[in-house]
Amino acid sequence: MLREDGIAVNWTTDGPLEIGVVLARVEEVLATHQLCILGTHEEQGPRMTPCFFAPMSGPRLVFVSSTSARHITNIEADSRSSALIVDSPGSGERRLVSLQMTGTVHGATGTERLKAAAIYAKHQAARLPGAAKAADLGSKRVFILQPHSIELLDTDLHRQTIRLQMSPR
């Protein structure tokens, strides 16, 4: 898989499905959601924060925050983080979908920041009018979650959680 920055990313899985099938479903879940629960570490223990995000190739997540946000302080102290997306079944539905991405977060700068902010602005334009233009995000910090592992549970795809692990190049 090739990211926007041209870097190739390889994934392995413990599940019975082909990597391409699983990654396609991961990308579909990310494309159809805008909010995740971001898990960070702080002195008192784990902290979970709802965050708007946008998907990037790889797959990765971009999120934007004010410089003083508590989860940003946590990320600066310890970059290990995770993001959780849960799609709860509607009335009468039995399908359960959850996606957890675990890895590290870094602050985007320079060209990477501009590209990531544009992706975020496009993905969030309908929900967050203030994010409709990447230029309006100038006072915010842009962060990217690079997952090392992904866990997908989609009961229509497979009965158990499928784990993807980034393989070393």
Image (cartoon, helix red, strand yellow):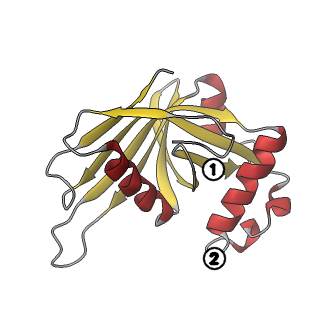
Measure the alpha-carbon separation of dots 2 and 1.
16 Å
- Type of the residue with mark 1: Phe
Q: Is residue 12 left or right of residue 61?
A: left
How many C-alpha atoms fall within 10 Å of the one at disc 1: few (<14), some, or many (≥20)? many
Label 1: element kind: strand
Residue 148 visible to the viewer: no
Q: Is residue 160 left or right of residue 81?
A: left
Q: Position of residue 137 (x, y in %)?
A: 80, 57
Q: Position of residue 151 (x, y in %)?
A: 32, 41
How many C-alpha atoms fall within 10 Å of the one at disc 2: few (<14), some, or many (≥20)? few
Q: Residue at x 67, y 72 (%)?
A: 125
Q: Which residue is mark 2?
A: 126
Label 2: element kind: loop
- Front one among 46 and 27: 27
Q: Position of residue 38 (x, y in %)?
A: 50, 44
Residue 119: image quadrant is: bottom right
Q: Position of residue 47 (x, y in %)?
A: 47, 37
Residue 63: give its label.
Answer: 1
